[in-house]
């Protein structure tokens, strides 16, 4: 089966790591007999903005909407274009237009990477954060009253819908079903947020009835963040509202070492629209142009894309290859400087691609 993939490198090191992500996909395609058609996209970048005065052409929805997946690098060059323009004009438009209501981040400690949590080894940290990506705390309902007076009042409402909660919970429960530990943890704060969060808890209990084999627990967000650090081995799939998920999906990967390796996905599970796969890191203007950016976040995002497209074995082979190359260490593999090595972006990408091919 052939897949149409939009390749959107964006800005900064996005442009440097993207070719390595594509190389990994090509290696997986060869080994597993898959067929990808890549379409290079030059918009959603600050270069495009400087030429056209906007981040994307007017017909971007038509050009991307029919793709099977969007493979994204990073966007933003704050020295040249303010982040609220570059980010709002591209990535956030994709998330909204393509109803990517699940933000998924694996938090997995890889071999050869030192966790900032003392004494943690690979195997101790291996879970997913599932973040609701479209509603909740990030609504624009609210406003200011009595502005400029000392009676000033500011209100911003949380909006949760049954449909919105249920669909992200369903994704999380389904994911838990595929995991060896069959466990789901819900982030809540129903002891302090007395209307929306008890409703979230209710929906979790309701959905749990359809998944009798999944063990379910919940933590208030304050103690949950503490437990990410103290007991990361407790977690398997963690599901959270938009704001709590935002926090957890940065904390989780941070517990697994360098930002250069972490991947993420913005998913429309029904496949009505293309999902988007991107590294967690940004455009890193501070190291751009030196060829030393770690390509693993991009390559691991390619693995998530393969899984999403139904090629579970191919996705697993890419993650295995990353693990083997990392385990070889900086003396035997061209690891990038953030991993303690002296390799370049393309040397590391090439080594991982070879490892994918040979299996
Ligand atoms: P964002 O664009 O998401 O707001 P940011 O600009 O604050 O994020 P990043 O661009 O992710 O942050 O960079 C944070 C730090 O991590 C920088 O010092 C950067 O050099 C480093 N970094 C980020 N990605 C990589 C990578 N792939 N390889 C090596 N170092 C990286
Ligand atoms: Mg940035």
Image (spheres, rainbow, N blue to C red):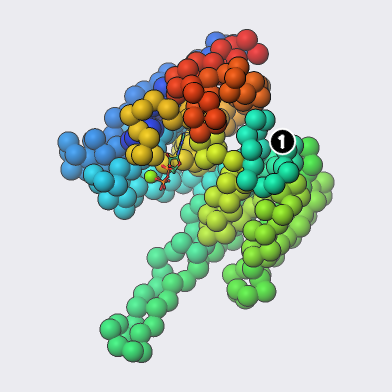
Which SS class for mark 1?
loop
Residue to which mark 1 is pinned: 122
Residue 346 percent across, percent down from the top left: 44, 19
- Residue 305 in sight in this render: no
Decide: few, some or many residues near mark 1? Use Cα within 10 Å; few <14, some 14-19, many ≥20. Answer: some
Closest to the observer, 17 or 186: 17
Question: Which part of the image, by quadrant, shows the N terminus?
Answer: top right
Q: What residue is drawn where x is 39% and y is 48%? A: 92
User: Is label 1 within 8 A of ligand 1 (CB to nearest ligand atom)?
Assistant: no
Residue 345 is left or right of residue 218, and the answer is left
Task: Please give the name of the residue rendered at 47% of the width and 36% of the height, measured from the top-left corner.
Answer: 278
Of 74 and 286, nearer the camera is: 286
* Horizontal side of residue 33 vs 64, given as left or right: right
Who is closer to the viewer here, 115 or 202? Answer: 115
User: Which residue occupies the extreme right position in the image?
Assistant: 213
Q: Is residue 108 left or right of residue 275?
A: right
- Above or below residue 78? Residue 323 is above
For image coordinates 30% across by 82% down, the residue present is 147
From where the camera sits, is residue 230 visible?
Answer: yes
Query: Residue visible at 42% across and 34% down?
Result: 72
State which quarter of the image contains the C terminus.
top right
Residue 156 sits in quarter: bottom left
Q: Position of residue 300 (x, y in %)?
A: 55, 30
Q: Position of residue 220 (x, y in %)?
A: 68, 65
Quadrant of the rendered image holding ligand 2: top left
Number of residue marks = 1
């Amino acid at each position: 089966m052939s897949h149409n993939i939009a390749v959107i490198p964006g800005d900064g090191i996005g442009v440097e790591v993207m070719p390595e992500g594509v190389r990994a996909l090509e290696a997986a395609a060869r080994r597993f007999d898959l067929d990808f058609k890549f379409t290079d996209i030059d918009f959603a970048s600050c270069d495009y903005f400087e030429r056209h005065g906007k981040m994307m052409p007017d017909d971007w929805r038509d050009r991307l909407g029919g793709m099977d997946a969007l493979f994204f690098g990073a966007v933003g060059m704050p020295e040249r274009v303010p982040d609220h323009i570059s980010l709002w004009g591209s990535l956030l438009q994709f998330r909204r237009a393509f109803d990517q209501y699940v933000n998924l981040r694996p938090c997995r400690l890889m071999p050869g990477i030192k966790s900032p949590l003392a004494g943690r080894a690979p195997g101790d940290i291996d879970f997913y954060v599932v973040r609701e990506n479209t509603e909740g705390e990030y609504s624009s309902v609210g406003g200011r009253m009595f502005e400029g007076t000392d009676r000033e009042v500011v209100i911003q409402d949380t909006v949760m819908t049954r449909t919105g909660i249920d669909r992200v919970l369903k994704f999380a429960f389904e994911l838990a079903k595929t995991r060896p530990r069959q466990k789901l943890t819900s982030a809540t704060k129903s002891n302090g947020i007395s209307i929306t969060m008890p409703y979230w808890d209710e929906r979790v209990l309701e959905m749990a009835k359809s998944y009798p084999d999944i063990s379910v627990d919940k933590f208030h967000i304050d103690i949950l963040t503490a437990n990410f650090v103290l007991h990361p081995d407790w977690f398997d799939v963690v599901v959270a509202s938009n704001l709590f998920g935002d926090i957890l999906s940065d904390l989780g990967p941070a517990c697994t070492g360098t930002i250069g390796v972490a991947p993420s996905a913005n998913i429309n599970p029904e496949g009505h629209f293309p999902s988007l796969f991107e590294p967690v890191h940004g455009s890193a203007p501070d190291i751009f142009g030196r060829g030393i950016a770690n390509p693993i976040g991009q390559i691991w995002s390619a693995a998530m894309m393969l899984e999403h497209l139904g090629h579970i074995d191919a996705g697993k082979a890419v993650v295995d290859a990353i693990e083997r190359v990392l385990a070889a260490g900086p003396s035997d593999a061209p690891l990038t400087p953030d991993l303690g090595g002296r390799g370049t972006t393309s040397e590391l990408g090439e080594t991982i691609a070879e490892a994918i091919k040979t299996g």
